[in-house]
Amino acid sequence: MKFPKPHTLKQIAEIISTSYIGADDFPVLGMNEIHIVEPGDIVFVDHPKYYDKALNSAATIVLINKEVECPEGKALLISDDPFRDFNKLTQHFKPFRSANQSISDSAKIGNNTIIQPNCFIGHNVVVGDDCLIHPNVIIYDDTIIGNNVTIHAGTVLGASAFYYKKRPEGFDQLISGGRVVVKDNVHIGALCTIDRGVTGDTIIGEGSKLDNQIQIGHDTVIGKKCLIASQVGIAGCVIIEDEVTIWGQVGSTSAITIGSKAIIHAQAGISKSLEGGKTYWGTPAQEAKAELKDKAYIKRIPEVIEQIKKK
């Protein structure tokens, strides 16, 4: 998430009431999670296990809960609770704005696009040309939809990320300030839910087709011409490359990559990254041919035992 205009390190420290290490005028351009940070971004870290990863990332400002040696060319914001202060920055730069009408005046709707009754379209939404949005679709603020997109009834684009920190008193949610971006020629079925990015974008690639009742987690990127069948659940920060096929009721863990042209059979459980160009089945997902061959061998065990007994 980039800020509307550049800020200085001192200005950011004043917003969240923290001390800092670095020049007062050190430039701060935005804030992002570790997997998408760029120079000028703030990244937060609150566990020693991840200090090195954050300090050595592309981010040039690290919001951290301990005063450590500052890498050359970078700056530190010292906080007793980086998670809390990252949320403060999101609230400051991307505050929630309530709606008072079904289609915001700031929404931009393209030529020949049809919006059926009872839809909600939030602030700063962009919908391209020749789209068809069926009844009861909810499109949260800042969502971007390309041309020739069809979205069926009851689908929700842009709900908050499922991202929590456990506290003694309960769970504290990381506030979502990102977007959902749907590219051209996408078809999204009924009752799908696609969460917005925490600071970046959840992306549905050009020409991809989603069946009914699919959940896509925050910051996940789906490539071009993917097919995803009903009741699939994709966790956050997953990369699905081009032309992947995922059949019904598949579930995935977060922060993995599924390679181009992979095929995932129904009800598979994906626990790690998968190479492209192969077919997978089972839980944890394995190459289908090898897994089915193993099962064929297992079925022969009783026969083998009987043969042994006869000897």
Image: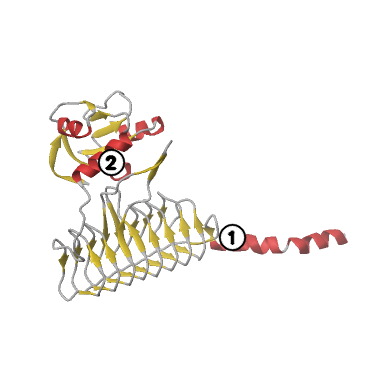
In the image, what residue occupies the spot 36% across and 58% down?
A: 241
As rendered, which of 29 and 95 lies closer to the eye? 95
Callout 2, which amino acid?
Asn
Of all residues, the one furthest to the right in this rendering is: 311
Is 287 on the left-hand or right-hand side of 181?
Answer: right
Front residue of 27/272: it is 27
Looking at the rendered structure, which numbered label has been put on residue 121? none
Label 1 sits on a secondary structure element that is helix
State the image coordinates of residue 149 (x, y, percent, origin top left): 26, 71
Name the amino acid type tagged 1: Glu
Q: For mark 1, does the 10 Å Cα neighbourhood hold few (<14), some (14 to 19), or many (20 or more) residues? A: some
Of helix, strand and loop, which one carries label 2? helix
Q: Is residue 56 visible?
A: no
Name the residue that disc number 2 marks.
87
User: Residue 50 appears at what percent x and percent y?
Assistant: 38, 34
48 versus 219 height, above or below: above
Q: For the residue carrying disc 2, how many other residues have a C-alpha within 10 Å: few (<14), some (14-19), or many (20+)?
A: some
Q: Nearer the viewer, mark 1 or mark 2?
A: 2
Please name the residue shown 36% across and 62% down the image. 193
Residue at coordinates 34% horizontally, 51% vertically from top-left? 161
Q: On the rendered structure, is 119 left or right of 209?
A: left
Q: Is residue 31 left or right of residue 301?
A: left
- In the picture, the quarter occupied by the C terminus is bottom right
Residue 240's x, y, as percent? 37, 58
| Residue 227 in view in this figure | yes
Instruction: Residue 153: name its quadrant.
Output: bottom left
Residue 293 at x, y percent in the picture: 62, 62
Which numbered disc flags the more N-terminal residue, 1 or 2? 2
Quickly name the residue at label 1.
291
Cβ–Cβ under 8 Å for marks 1 and 2: no
Cα distance between the residues tagged 1 and 2: 45 Å
Quadrant in the rendering for residue 132: bottom left
